[in-house]
């Protein structure tokens, strides 16, 4: 008897809100199209270790609002283990998978492209709070991280105002400043520092002077958003050497905001405090935007599978959901559009 075609679904790299919405959308769309769906646990590790499960309609119901990923994730790469590629091929054959829908950030999608070149029939879905995946306007998880960071900044504003302090908040984003730019703009922050604009000694002094002038004008507090990859003079660049295969990079050293806060307090004499948002901005339920984007990407991914457009990734171009070649996405990050940063900068003191 002819068996049903089978699709594997997996999530790799850092988790983010919206992943389960994408798993739900791709699994349910595939089931409706007559596929059987295999959930692969913990990214490529699941294929290497034969760790997977059948995903049913029921199993993927009620998860659209859940943070994280029901499949688990990892940064394991078959390219870095003994005979990894062959073991993946063998497992795909045993499972009878016709294709794999892989959800990942810039590093994981770069790996997906390499595995596609090794003959694995892959369709990618861009997800990462960093929004640093090229060829798509937004990735799943970004808008939720921006909302979480904005809520935190709004809370910091009230305590900064009460204590007449300069308040810094360090946000994630690895080697780009998308979260800092969007959350800073939405909070009306007084300063935003991003990796794309290294804080040279000169820029640092200009920033401190703006804070002094704000205080001199009688505004008794300031809010400064610091992307974790911000480059400070004399501070060892926290941006690690990206490993395009698995992005096993260690995230930029947390603490850059504390260093900047100490400098600000020393140079301006203004009482300064620092908070780091850390993994809070990567957890919990996705905002509606990310649920919708994840659903649209999940549906599009199955369309690409049906059309056998392997080696492509779903992408958002304006309001359109399209497929783009993974080769155009791999091995590079989408840095902040400095026009967008320029809009935020118009309001710095
Ligand atoms: O790529 C998403 C991200 O949250 C980055 O913003 C952050 O620098 C990194 O992952 C943290 O990596 P890990 O979860 O391995 O500590």
Image (tube, rainbow, N blue to C red):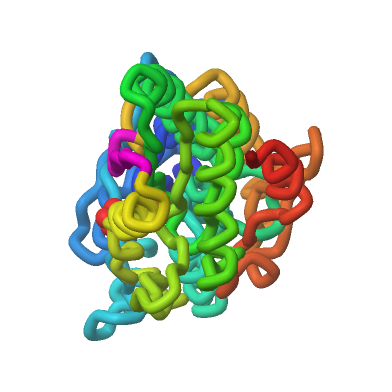
Q: What residue do we see at 36% from left, 32% from top?
A: 165
Q: Which residues are magenta?
A: 270-280
Relative to residue 201, is residue 135 depicted above or below?
Answer: above
Position of residue 178 measured from the top left corner of the image (x, y, whole percent): 57, 48
Q: What residue do we see at 70% from left, 64% from top?
A: 325
Q: Nearer the viewer, residue 93 or 64?
A: 64
Residue 230 within the segment the image draws in magenta:
no
Left or right placement of residue 50 versus residue 127 in this view: left
Q: What residue do we see at 40% from left, 37% from top?
A: 166
Q: Nearer the viewer, residue 47 or 71?
A: 71
Q: What residue do we see at 60% from left, 38% from top?
A: 182
Relative to residue 85, is residue 210 depicted above or below?
Answer: above
Q: Is residue 295 visible?
A: no
Q: Is residue 268 visible?
A: yes
Residue 273 within the segment the image draws in magenta:
yes
Ligand 1 shows up in the quarter that is bottom left
Q: Residue furthest bottom?
A: 82
């Amino acid at each position: 008897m002819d068996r049903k075609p089978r699709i594997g679904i997996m999530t790799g790299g850092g988790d983010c809100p919206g992943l389960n919405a994408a798993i739900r959308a791709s699994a349910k769309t595939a089931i409706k199209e007559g596929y059987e769906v295999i959930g692969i646990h913990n990214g490529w590790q699941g294929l290497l270790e034969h760790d997977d499960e059948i995903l049913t309609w029921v199993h993927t119901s009620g998860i659209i609002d859940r943070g994280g990923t029901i499949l688990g994730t990892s940064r394991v790469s078959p390219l870095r283990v003994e005979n990894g590629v062959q073991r993946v091929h063998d497992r795909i054959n045993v499972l009878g998978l016709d294709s794999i829908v892989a959800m990942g950030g810039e590093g994981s999608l770069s790996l997906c492209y390499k595995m596609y070149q090794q003959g694995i029939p892959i369709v990618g879905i861009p997800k990462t709070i960093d929004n640093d995946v090229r060829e798509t306007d937004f990735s799943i998880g970004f808008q939720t991280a921006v909302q979480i960071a904005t809520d935190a900044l709004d809370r910091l504003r009230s305590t900064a105002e009460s204590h007449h302090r300069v308040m810094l908040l360090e946000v994630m984003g690895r080697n780009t400043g998308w979260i800092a730019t969007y959350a800073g703009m939405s909070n009306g922050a007084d300063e935003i520092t991003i990796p794309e604009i290294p804080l040279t000694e000169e820029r640092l002094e200009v920033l401190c002077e703006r804070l002094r002038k704000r205080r001199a004008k009688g505004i008794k507090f300031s809010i400064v958003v610091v992307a974790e990859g911000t480059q400070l003079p004399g501070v060892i660049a926290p941006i690690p050497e990206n490993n395009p295969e698995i992005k096993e990079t260690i995230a930029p050293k947390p603490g850059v905001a504390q260093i900047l806060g100490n400098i600000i307090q020393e140079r301006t004499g203004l009482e300064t405090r620092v908070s780091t948002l850390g993994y809070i901005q990567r957890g919990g339920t996705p905002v509606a935007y990310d649920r919708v984007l994840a659903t649209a990407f999940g549906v599009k991914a199955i369309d690409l599978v049906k059309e056998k457009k392997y080696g492509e990734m779903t992408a958002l171009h304006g309001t359109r959901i399209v497929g783009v070649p993974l080769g155009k996405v791999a091995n590079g990050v989408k840095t902040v559009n400095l026009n967008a940063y320029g809009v935020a900068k118009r309001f710095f003191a």
